[in-house]
Amino acid sequence: MRRAEVSRQTKETRITIVLNLDGSGTVHTDTGLPFLDHMLQAMAHHGRFDLDCRASGDLEVDSHHTVEDIGLVLGETIKKAIGDGRGIRRFAHAMVPMDESLATVALDCSGRGFLVYQGCLSHPALGGIERDVFEHFFQSLCGKAGLNVHIIFHGRNDHHQMEAAFKAFGIALGEASTIVEGREDIPSTKGTL
């Protein structure tokens, strides 16, 4: 079982995440931000991995520290669960439509964190989270996890756009981290990710 648990505590946040890449999509979240809980639940459910995310932060300031630190801890947990990447598919992509919105995610478990994020939300905040913080969440996650990810989305409804992006990310991560039957090598011509 490829399971990992990571905790982080600062003066601003306290976070614990447990991740099982070989799960079934069982999710428990309590971040203090119901919209983020909804996004994480959609991501893990459609990615078919188990996720338990408990977080408390200085939400009286704003959502930034909490969302950023959840991204950092989730990224670290993903990296730990994937390990050296032996036998994984490594590359995957997903397209998710949600009514008028469409999100595409291409993902490489390369060991090198990089994010391309193309899309624009209409409103300054969504579910109490400033719109620029969503990109920062994915940047933090990708950097810590060592994932190269391209997220592209468009639409008219901010909720639909962001939910489609989180679902597509979850599906792509689930596929890319899947163990390929009969594959025992590290999927890289370099011999390491």
Image (cartoon, rainbow, N blue to C red):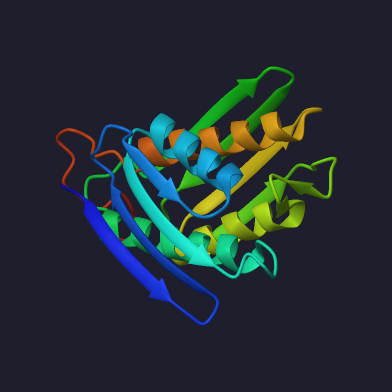
Residue 162 seen from this side: yes
Percent position of residue 119, x then y: 76, 42
Query: 149 or 50: nearer the eye?
Result: 50
Q: Residue furthest top?
A: 99
Task: Tell me if residue 95 comes above or below residue 191 in the rendering.
Answer: above
Locate residue 34 relative to residue 111 in the image: left or right: right
Q: Residue furthest front?
A: 60
Locate residue 53 relative to residue 13 in the image: left or right: left
Percent position of residue 13, x then y: 50, 72
Q: Residue at x 45, y 61 (%)?
A: 55
Percent position of residue 101, x then y: 71, 25
Locate residue 181 relative to residue 193 in the image: left or right: left
Query: 84 or 137: nearer the eye?
Result: 137
Query: 152 or 129: nearer the eye?
Result: 129
Q: Residue at x 48, y 34 (%)?
A: 42
Percent position of residue 27, x then y: 36, 39
Q: Identify the image quadrant of residue 105.
A: top right
Task: Tell me if residue 60 comes above or below residue 91 in the rendering.
Answer: below
Q: Residue at x 22, y 45 (%)?
A: 87
